[in-house]
Amino acid sequence: MKHFPIFLNVATKRIVLAGGGEAALAKLRLLLKTEAQIEVFAEAPDPQIVTWALENRLTLTTRALTTGDVNGAALFYAASENDAEDARTAAIARAEGTLVNLVDNLADSQFITPAIVDRDPVTVAIGTEGAAPVLARAIKADLEERLPVSLGRLTRIGQAFRKASMKLPFGSARRDFWADFYFNAGPRALADGEDAARASLNTLLTKHLNAETREGHVIFVGAGPGDPELLTLKARAALDRADVVIHDGLVPGEILELARREATLVPVGKTGFGKSTPQDDINAAMIYHAAQGLEVVRLKSGDPAVFGRLDEEIDALTGAGIAFTIIPGLTAASAAVASLGQSLTQRGRNSSARLITAHDTKGYAEQDWRALARPGEVAAIYMGKRAARFVQGRLLMHGADPATPVGIVENASRADERVISTTLAALPDALNAANLNGPAVIMLGLAQRARAVEKRETA
Ligand code: SAH
């Protein structure tokens, strides 16, 4: 991020602009929304600027800007539509210690003006660092449509009530109250005028004060294999409401960023071989937060029910009398076969597919190797990187064909995904050569489909 977005208090501050044509008009329309004192310098100002000056909305000086004119201003805009003239006035402003913007000249500007959606006091600023003004305009149009025009009025009315709302305990109770007001009772009451909207706040507060305190609750949420777009809508909604998010190390930052901004993030990393959080601590964290009446999301990679020790966590909650729900997610094997361009099951080849792990609590995990060694069998091996030689040995011992295709998918669905096609005979060597860093699922019986037509869209 080259440009850091902030909201600058310009009330009673001066903003100076040099220029009197179209570019100046466009900027002035925005600046006149502020409480700043606007000063314009232009030899030949557009009649609209003259009108604004007559209405005392800005002060107009009908000559070119010179040394001493900018002194002490909060911001300066060079908007003459003449490069040499803009460079001249910007140099004066810079020398007089003011932040400058040259219209349509990103390189020499110290700040840029974002596209703005104005529902004062709710203001949305959209910037693309000059990279895609068309995109900024499209986002603005989208938001203009989505944010009701009454939002600003409602916010002002709500603002005056913030103190009173503190009678409700901090956290979900207070949040529920405000959500009820802004999206429900408020807009309805506002239809009958601002007094009605103000009155609705009192009624609503009484209703929420009398509401039973919310019980704590844990939602097990499947975060999917890593691509945020593979989250379910329910997972997104749960993240949106969460007070606390207790998450695995495999859940990427892009997904954690979707959690409500005020949510507390509790990392409980568990890597097969690195540092990990003991299961008891994870259980204790869930119980601790839920017992306070908070909305707890237990965010697990993939599907929470696949190699996620879900039962142990459910048992702990049940023991503590805490309710839970489960939102399933896309498991790594599903993402992996998609990347291979393959079907997990196929008529005539395999009518079953197994999800197996190469590790269990006692070390390497034993499986029905004889069944897995049969031609056409398909299995997704989770946590299998280190156990590959063991798996290979067992399968060959039980008569598996050394030429059995194997597909290794690392970081399935993520930007850094890698797919390696190999055979059972070459599996350990292929893994060594690949030097995998990320999570990988080994698809026994399936390598990447030969034709390139299955290539994943990256757009
Ligand atoms: N609940 C998860 C699995 C957790 S066990 C799920 O349903 O996917 C952790 C193992 O899952 C890793 O060792 C790896 O084998 C696999 N895994 C998780 N995310 C993966 C990804 N994006 N790509 C490949 N394998 C992944």
Image: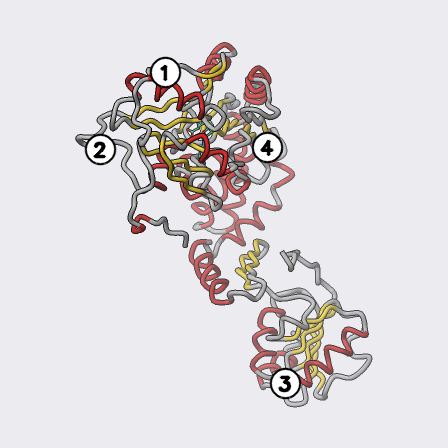
* Distance (Cα) linking label 3 and label 4: 51 Å
The answer to whether the residues at label 2 and label 3 have Cβ atoms under 8 Å apart is no
* Distance (Cα) linking label 2 and label 3: 68 Å
Task: Say which residue label 4 marks.
Answer: 265
**Element type where label 4 sits in the image:** strand
* Distance (Cα) linking label 4 and label 2: 41 Å
Amino acid type at mark 2: Gln
**Element type where label 2 sits in the image:** loop
Task: Say which residue label 2 marks.
Answer: 346
Amino acid type at mark 4: Leu
Residue 410 or residue 78, whichever sits in front = 410
For ligand 1, the image quadrant comes to top left
Which is more N-terminal, label 2 or label 4?
4
The answer to whether the residues at label 3 and label 1 have Cβ atoms under 8 Å apart is no
- Residue 367, image x, y percentages: 36, 16
> Can you tell which quarter of the image residue 369 is in?
top left
Task: Say which residue label 3 marks.
Answer: 82
Q: Residue at x 43, y 16 (%)?
A: 365
Residue 292 or residue 309, whichever sits in front = 309
